[in-house]
Image (tube, rainbow, N blue to C red):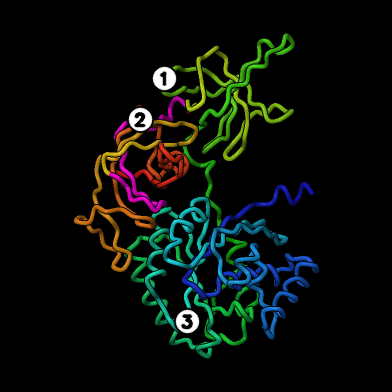
Amino acid sequence: MNGYLDMELLRFTTAGSVDDGKSTLIGRLLYDSKSIFEDQLEAVKAASERLGNEEVNLALLTDGLRAEREQGITIDVAYRYFATPKRKFIIADTPGHIEYTRNMVTGASTADAAIILVDARNGIIEQTKRHSYIASLLQLPHVILAVNKMDLVDFSEEVFNRIKKEYREIAKKLNLKKVFYLPISARDGDNVVDRSSKTPWYTGDTLLYLLETLPPKGEDKHPARFPVQYVIRPQNDRFHDYRAYAGRIASGTYKVGDRVTILPSFTESTIKAIDETNQALSEASAPQSVAIRLEDNVDISRGDMIVKSDELPRQDTTISLLVCWLNHRPLNIGAKYIIRHTTDEVFGIVKEVYYKVNMNTLENNIDDKTIKMNDIAHIAIKTSKPLKYNLYEQNRITGSLVIIDEGSFETVGAGMIVSI
């Protein structure tokens, strides 16, 4: 069991237009990697028969809700888990409809890679550009362009190369870091887990091999950030001297003896001990949840941040964001919202909209200031007290925030902090 727990984890998201085959692809991965149980397979066989499918419909493996299954659509982000002897995986399966763009932002926000599916018959469409823009926006280090349904174009190398050439221009424009191109048939399993004899012209890796070998994001390599969630001070005689600050390490590594600064007070101290459940640690790294004890009795509360003294973050009340708007009510310039950033919560006012992204052309529209649901825009907010942050490209935990409507308490926007 310990071996499984110690296995490296890769998070990836799938995206594509409606009927591009996302659910079928995930079902194929689960089936061919032997990551499903017999009773699950029997249930899918029975459901396939009820729906009149002559073959087993692997897409039904990932449609968790009965309503979704009966309609043949995926309507929310569905998280799936599977493992191979080499690695554990968490899949975020997101809807293909344009009106669910916000769901891809949710699914991709914690991902190490994105699989973007393209129907070989249709080629690059608006949704391909939209999903690629989000992958770029969220700084995903790896994008896999899976050209699916190659069986319906007779596994044509010419079709594949045409799509690959067109997407390379998009990748260059969006500054995507690393892109892999795969010709696949999710329905039949070509180049998904096993190499296909039908594409002798393709010499690259299979999808599963790529997923097993891609390096995940290393949050432990960023500057140390520890947002305080809770102050532990037991109210009994046995532990009357115990005071610790609990939370999840957002990034970096902390060691006993490190000199640290507490923000926003700028008080300095030294790490005395690091506790995890019932054991003491000499060091801890992201994303561990720990309790940190300090040498000095310092006034710390939820929302404060413990950082290494030589790795201070930025602090400011004027914040520049790329925001994906998540709510049916449009963004209101001048309105007051609740801003939730790490464990901190402040009020903020939208001061300006710089531009809205045109998803058809991937150009910035500086004239249209109306930001509706699923729109992506560059805005500026003014907060009631300074945020302790990094740019999103430097740290995706301290570089992101959510915007909440103060009346309904609905989450209305997801923001990535960028330079003005």
Identify which residue is drawn at 46% across, 55% down: 105
- When asked about the image quadrant of residue 126, the answer is bottom left
Please give the residue where the numbered disc 2 appears in the rendered image.
Answer: 315
Which residue bears the numbered disc 1?
A: 266
How many angstroms separate mark 2 from mark 1 (CA)?
A: 11 Å
Residue 124, image quadrant? bottom left
Mark 2 closeness class: few <14, some 14–19, many ≥20 residues within 10 Å: some
Q: Which range of residues does the magenta coloring cover?
A: 307-332
* 86 displayed left or right of 367: right
Q: Of the residues shown, which amino acid type is indicated by label 1? A: Phe
Residue 280 place in picture, x, y as percent? 70, 26
Dot 3, how many residues are within 10 Å of its Cα: few (below 14), some (14-19), or many (20+)? many
Query: Eyeballing the image, is 51 above or below 274?
Result: below
Disc on res. 32: none
Spot occupied by residue 68 in the image (x, y as percentages of width and height): 60, 66
Magenta run includes residue 189: no
Residue on which the image places disc 3: 120
The percent coordinates of residue 399 (x first, y second) are 41, 41
SS class, disc 1: loop
Quarter of the figure with the C terminus: top left
Q: Nearer the viewer, residue 405 or 289?
A: 405
Using the image, determine if residue 385 lies above or below residue 220.
above
Mark 3 or mark 1, earlier in chain: 3
